[in-house]
Amino acid sequence: MTYPVGTTVYVPVSLLPDGERYPTSLYQTPVTAVQDRSAKVRLRDGADSDWIATSKLHRNAGIVIVSVGDFGTEETLLNPLSKSVLQFCRLLLDDSSVTHLRVRAIGELGKWWKLNHAAYSYIVFIGHGAPDSIHFGYGGARTPEHFGMRVFSIATEKKTVISLCCETGKAAFSKKFSGLSSCGHLIAPFHSIHGAIASQFLQTYMCWQLLHGKSTTVAFKKAAETVPGKDIFRLWRNGKHVA
């Protein structure tokens, strides 16, 4: 992706001088120079940074955590997992860049998304899944076709979608969902997954991508190697299994 001079971007603080002194994992600042696939940004003291690969910059970095309620396990599983993910994301980004949305019907999500999609680059789904769907308290199983019609029917920049819903990493769901026009990458569990493992994976992935500026594929592989178990998560893009 190219970033013309003057474009406001988010930079992983690990790439900046005294990065450990920044309060969040990303620093919002304008691009001051561009050369091939590298850019310089303005530092806090007004000086220019060293050259940084544009692949490590983010135009947007908002995270929305979508808790899909089922009436049955919200207090014992979904709410604790959502809180764990939310508080961790608030350590990475300022509060204005992180939102927690509770829904029980796909129409609620669609209405909210239509108004707010521009502010977010990451969508985290927390709920119950199946090989071909995510289960909503109202309406039951919702397939990728439902998401395409009810949520992602408007043109948006491509988003990174992370599903922590069991079995949604299987082809019946992921192949079609990752092919939706608004989905850049889909990361989802291939098997049933414990809530603690789901939280650990999400946190590790976000650290590698936002804090250390790794690509989606590299961050995914490092996170997958860290959590207990083998081949728990799958990475999909444009209808194809990537990793």
Image (cartoon, rainbow, N blue to C red):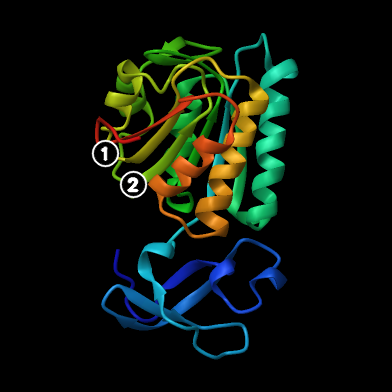
Q: Residue at x 57, y 75 (%)?
A: 16
- Indicate the secondary structure of the residue bearing disc 2: loop
Location of residue 148 in the rendering, given as x and y in whole percent from the top left corner: 31, 28
Q: CA distance from mark 2 to mark 1?
A: 7 Å
Examine the rendered structure and indicate whether residue 96 appears above or below residue 236. below
Location of residue 212 in the rendering, given as x and y in whole percent from the top left corner: 54, 59
- Indicate the secondary structure of the residue bearing disc 1: loop
Q: Residues within 10 Å of mark 2 (few under 14, many from 20)?
A: some
Q: Residue at x 69, y 19 (%)?
A: 77
| Residue hosting label 1 | 181
Q: Residue at x 30, y 63 (%)?
A: 1
| Residue hosting label 2 | 158
Examine the rendered structure and indicate whether residue 5 appears above or below residue 173. below
Looking at the figure, which quarter contains the C terminus? Answer: top left
Asked if the residue at tag 1 contacts the one at tag 2, i.e. Cβ–Cβ closer than 8 Å, the answer is yes
On the image, which quarter does residue 185 sit in?
top left
Q: Residue at x 53, y 71 (%)?
A: 15
